[in-house]
Image (cartoon, rainbow, N blue to C red):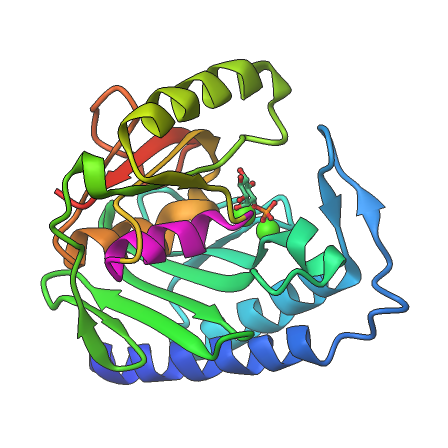
Amino acid sequence: MKDIHIILAEIIDAAKECGKIMLLADRNDLKIKDKAGKANFVTEYDCKIQKIIEKKLADILPNAQFLGEEEDCKIDKNAEYIFVVDPVDGTTNFIKDYHMSCISIGLIRNGKRYLGVVHNPYLNETYHAISGEGAYLNGNRIHVSDDDLENSIVLFGSSPYNTELAKKSFELAYEYFQKCLDIRRSGSAALDLCAIAAGRAEIYFELILSPWDFAAGALIVEEAGGNVTTVDGRELPCLEKSSLIAKNK
Ligand code: IPD
Ligand code: CA
Ligand code: CA
């Protein structure tokens, strides 16, 4: 197998090429379709980027399995390598031209998070981590902050496609709001995780996420010195839906 650092560089190039596709999208013709759940959309670009990235990743690491959001992927969960990809994390933002979306690529090796790349084309920010080697933003090492709750910004996701969780999500956000500096809701779980890793915010939680939302970002937080678990403190799975809380310490 190729050296993991060569693989990483190739994955970052692939993510950046997909980022260009997002920036150059024909905003008059996104071909938006509804998916299951409230405000759950898919555009032609989600599907197009997924097809492109799937092909590129197959060239980069031919023996890896591929799990992506926009296709019913049948994978062998026991395979040595599994890519877990969100072609556009923050689709509603993308549709609204809100400039808060990214491409998220995680690589699982033998059932553990091994590599993660998150690319935000709007800010030209690329986060990456390899297990045991630290987390980076545009090649510079990043660390979680050491601010306590009182001096924290708390991020949360509203689990928009599972409205039965909305009340609980907002109640929890309100609890944090009373104890921290302020609350944010970005619309991209992967970028929220990267914000914790970069020390821009201290806590992020969401009551249900899919594996592609956190495959890359969870590793990036851990490699930046943070802690990621389910909301009730259990180990975060790699390939299943889960609640998630990421903390600076
Ligand atoms: C969504 C975003 C959002 C989060 C949702 C995710 P999508 O992903 O990450 O911030 O609250 O839970 O599903 O649908 O834009 O790829
Ligand atoms: Ca997502
Ligand atoms: Ca998505």
Residue lying at the far right of the rendered structure: 28
Give the residue displayed 50% in from the left and 80% down from the top.
16
Q: Is residue 36 left or right of residue 156?
A: right
Q: Quadrant of residue 132?
A: bottom left
Q: Is residue 129 left or right of residue 21?
A: left
Q: Main secondary structure of the magenta part?
A: helix
Q: Is residue 190 left or right of residue 219?
A: right
Q: Is residue 100 left or right of residue 191?
A: right
Q: Nearer the viewer, residue 144 or 79?
A: 144
Q: Quadrant of residue 4?
A: bottom left
Tell me where the magenta segment starts and ends, as one range: 187-199
* Residue 191 on the magenta span: yes
Indicate the position of residue 49 as horizontal and vertical percent values: 64, 68
Indicate the position of residue 154 as horizontal and vertical percent values: 34, 39
* Residue 51 on the magenta span: no
Q: Nearer the viewer, residue 172 or 34?
A: 172
Confirm whether residue 109 shows in the render. no
Give the residue displayed 20% in from the left and 35% down from the top.
149
